[in-house]
Image (cartoon, coloured by chain):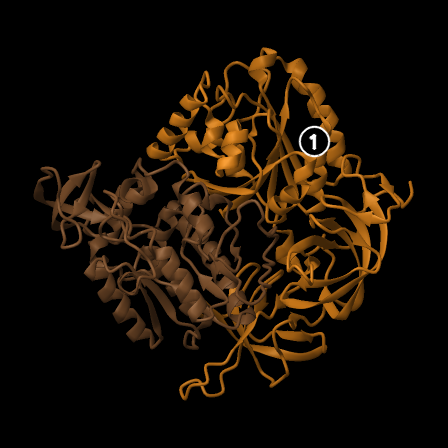
């Protein structure tokens, strides 16, 4: 078989990805140089995987000087947890887990009894506790500005007060590549090195760098049921109600979140190239397609972010 | 082609958000669910037509008030190019947001309402763009549908701004008559303005050539971080990590280590993908050198033949961004310049610049929020810098309030040639 000729479109993508990569590496190095105790939020989702990949590249050949941090709702895809543990082990770095089930057990947080409630919102107090307990002064997050319109206003260095709150109307101006990381005790900075990446950039970079992803990102057969137009994975954490029928479907997931709120898409895309081809023509945003949490209110994300969410 | 960073500014009614909504919509960067959500909001506000602007306003307060408050970044791409658009409000009370958006942009997109002609705000956008070193300006004369697509509405605006852009020494400028609402000359060429012979906006942005002035600039590399693996495998490894601010570097090149001025030779350049023999502007690399010199964060590796200035006094144009304080002579601040943080004292506030008429300056006791002036600073340690006009990366700085930690100022080293004499 002949290898295909590189076309101008491939070259274009490559130069853009290199520019985004360089910008992200610059941000990661600033944080490592200026902060005493950074941590990197890692969910086993594609954005945090790319962020970790960039951090490794930014500091090679040295080992990462900070831990990865996972806020575990206890309802995660086993494939993502396995990936998380293996990644930490391979890189020889610490894994810090903030556990929602433990916080529920100790009474630190209360589960909502409302129908349709998930543990999504419970992650915020657990995240803030973890940041405080570990004395993190900078926390890397994989959020992108193209994800959601409240995120479009977020800084690369996003200041959080003693309560972990984000104040969208009172953000520090951010100019050139000069980031202001000064904080007082108890405050911290959320750092978003992927701010300028789009979903498609992430996928193309994964392809170009040949980065391994958890298997749930690729089409596979799974027991699902339909809820609010999304295909929810049938699991011990989420069962059908009101006559919702369980059936087997070939699906893939576009984001990796809590199993109870992350919907799958009917898909035949088993390879990265096929996934990218599907995304390039997709007409629904990844949050709209697969996150029940963002559908609840027009400003759902802004509200959660103000409280200290990722 | 590289990605293109665009800064735009506009006021409530000139149709900026509509234009951006149109660009995103027509380049299919908007997903259906986002459209639905904006549509629902439109309906709640009982708008007559679908409000494209709602696609871009992100915060609740912005949607309620129908204005853009903060800088928002938008992303769209065509098969030819990826675009990052910094969308900022245009009102004078948001000058600092405009300055912020312009600081990283290659192109300024200025929007003028065809019915009102060049207003103060249009001039202000041009001046801020020029001060921030933007070399390319595209002027969209919008709402041509409301002036019957007449050339007579377009030409006076073009003539008026043309003169200003020349005075500001903008390298390339281009004028396009459009209707963002109806889509004329945004993505597709309009057939309602046969007198306009050039192409529409999007193809112009796709094909805009950015001059490579900085490729020939002298090599500048602020050291961010020293990588020392402290492992057996890399026992003696010591790499200087950073992003090339200007120029290029190659293995074997003689370089100077600033501020000490010691010279050494580059032995290795490591890119994110491994060793390379040379690297250019904006690349994030790790450099290793032949000699064991004392180099830490804040140092700058430089071309040995063309060295930057090393001084503890500097003359700069500053935009004040502090809400609760003002800049006055004698004020003490933190300064972050490249990778170096020091303390700075305001030696003198030379003058305030009228950003609506850039050649006019006036003496002033203080710079308040959103005001721009020319200052002399003295720093606690020498800074290694260039003029902003020749290097954004080594010619820019931010000022930080020592008690609140807020970013209160943005500075560009040097004095723009088009500024009037002080007191004129």
Q: Which residue is mark 1?
A: B121
- From the viewer's perspective, is B397 left or right of B268? right
- From the viewer's perspective, is B341 left or right of B327? left
Residue B157, x across and y down, in percent: 70, 23
Q: Nearer the viewer, residue B279 or A64?
A: A64
Q: Quadrant of residue A62?
A: bottom left
Residue A218, x across and y down, in percent: 20, 52
Residue B85, x across and y down, in percent: 53, 41
Residue B187 visible (yes or no)? no
Q: Quadrant of residue B143?
A: top right
- Seen at 55% across and 15% down, the residue is B145
Q: Quadrant of the C terminus of chain B?
A: top right
* Location of residue A50 with respect to B102 vertically, above or below: below
Chain in orange colour:
B
Q: Identify the element where label 1 is drawn.
A: helix
Q: Nearer the viewer, residue B321 or A305?
A: A305
Residue B395, x across and y down, in percent: 70, 58
Residue A18 visible (yes or no)? yes
Chain in brown colour:
A
- From the viewer's perspective, is B187 left or right of A286? right
């Amino acid at each position: 078989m002949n290898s295909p000729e590189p076309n101008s479109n491939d070259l274009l993508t490559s130069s853009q990805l290199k520019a985004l990569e360089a910008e992200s590496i610059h941000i990661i190095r600033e944080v490592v140089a200026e902060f005493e105790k950074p941590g990197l939020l890692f969910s086993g989702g594609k954005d945090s995987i790319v962020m970790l990949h960039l951090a490794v590249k930014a500091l090679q050949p040295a080992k990462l000087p900070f831990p990865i941090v996972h806020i575990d709702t206890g309802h995660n895809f086993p494939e993502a947890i396995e990936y998380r543990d293996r990644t930490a082990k391979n890189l020889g770095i610490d894994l810090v887990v903030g556990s929602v089930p433990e916080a529920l057990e100790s009474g630190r947080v209360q589960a909502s009894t409302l129908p349709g409630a998930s543990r999504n919102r419970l992650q915020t107090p657990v995240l803030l506790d973890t940041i405080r307990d570990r004395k993190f002064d900078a926390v890397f997050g994989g959020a992108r500005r193209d994800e959601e319109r409240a995120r479009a206003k977020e800084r690369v260095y996003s200041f959080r007060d003693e309560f972990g709150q984000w104040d969208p109307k009172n953000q520090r101006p951010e100019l050139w590549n000069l980031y202001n990381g000064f904080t007082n005790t108890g405050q911290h900075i959320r750092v978003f090195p992927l701010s300028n990446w789009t979903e498609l950039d992430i996928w193309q970079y994964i392809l170009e760098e040949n980065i391994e992803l958890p298997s749930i990102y690729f089409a596979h057969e799974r027991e699902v049921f339909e809820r609010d137009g999304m295909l929810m994975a049938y699991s011990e954490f989420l069962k059908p109600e009101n006559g919702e029928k369980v059936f087997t479907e070939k699906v893939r997931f576009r984001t990796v979140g809590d199993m109870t709120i992350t919907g799958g898409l009917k898909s035949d895309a088993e390879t990265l190239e096929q996934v990218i081809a599907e995304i390039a023509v997709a007409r629904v945003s990844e949050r709209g397609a697969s996150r029940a949490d963002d559908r609840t209110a027009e400003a759902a994300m802004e509200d959660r972010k103000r409280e200290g969410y990722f | 082609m590289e990605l293109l960073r665009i800064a735009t500014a506009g006021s409530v009614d000139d149709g900026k958000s509509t234009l951006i909504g149109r660009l995103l919509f027509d380049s299919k960067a908007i997903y259906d669910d986002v459209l639905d959500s904006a549509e629902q909001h439109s309906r709640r506000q009982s708008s007559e037509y679908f409000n494209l602007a709602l696609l871009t306003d992100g915060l609740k307060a912005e949607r309620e008030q129908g204005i853009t408050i903060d800088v928002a970044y938008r992303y769209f791409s065509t098969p030819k190019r990826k675009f990052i658009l910094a969308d900022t409000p245009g009102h004078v009370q948001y000058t600092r947001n405009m300055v912020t958006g312009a600081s990283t942009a290659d192109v300024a997109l200025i929007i003028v309402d065809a019915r009102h002609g060049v207003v103060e705000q249009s001039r202000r956008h041009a001046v801020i763009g020029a001060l921030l070193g933007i070399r390319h300006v595209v002027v969209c004369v919008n709402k041509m549908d409301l002036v019957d697509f007449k050339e007579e509405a377009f030409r006076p605006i073009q003539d008026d701004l043309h003169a200003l852009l020349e005075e500001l020494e903008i390298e390339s400028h281009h004028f396009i008559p459009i209707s963002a609402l109806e889509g004329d000359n945004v993505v597709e060429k309009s057939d309602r303005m046969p007198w306009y012979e050039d192409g529409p906006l999007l193809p112009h942005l796709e094909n805009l050539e950015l001059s490579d002035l900085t490729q020939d600039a002298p090599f500048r590399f602020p050291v961010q971080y020293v990588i020392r693996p402290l492992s057996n495998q890399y026992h003696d490894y010591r790499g200087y990590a950073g992003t090339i601010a200007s120029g290029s570097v190659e293995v074997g090149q003689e370089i100077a280590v600033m501020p000490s001025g010691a010279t050494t030779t580059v032995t290795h350049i490591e890119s994110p993908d491994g060793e390379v023999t040379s690297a250019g502007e904006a690349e994030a690399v790790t450099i290793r050198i032949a000699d064991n010199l004392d180099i830490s964060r804040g140092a700058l590796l430089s071309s040995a033949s063309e060295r930057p200035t090393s001084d503890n006094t500097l003359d700069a144009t500053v935009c004040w961004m502090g809400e609760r304080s003002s800049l006055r002579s004698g004020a003490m601040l933190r300064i972050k310049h490249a990778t170096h943080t020091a303390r700075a004292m305001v030696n003198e506030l030379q003058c305030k610049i009228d950003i609506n008429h850039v050649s006019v300056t006036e003496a002033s006791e203080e710079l308040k929020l959103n005001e721009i002036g020319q200052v002399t600073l003295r720093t606690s340690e020498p800074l290694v810098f260039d003029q902003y006009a020749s290097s954004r990366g080594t010619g820019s700085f931010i000022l930080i309030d020592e008690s609140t930690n807020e970013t209160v100022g943005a500075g560009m080293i040097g004095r723009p040639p088009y500024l009037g004499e002080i007191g004129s």
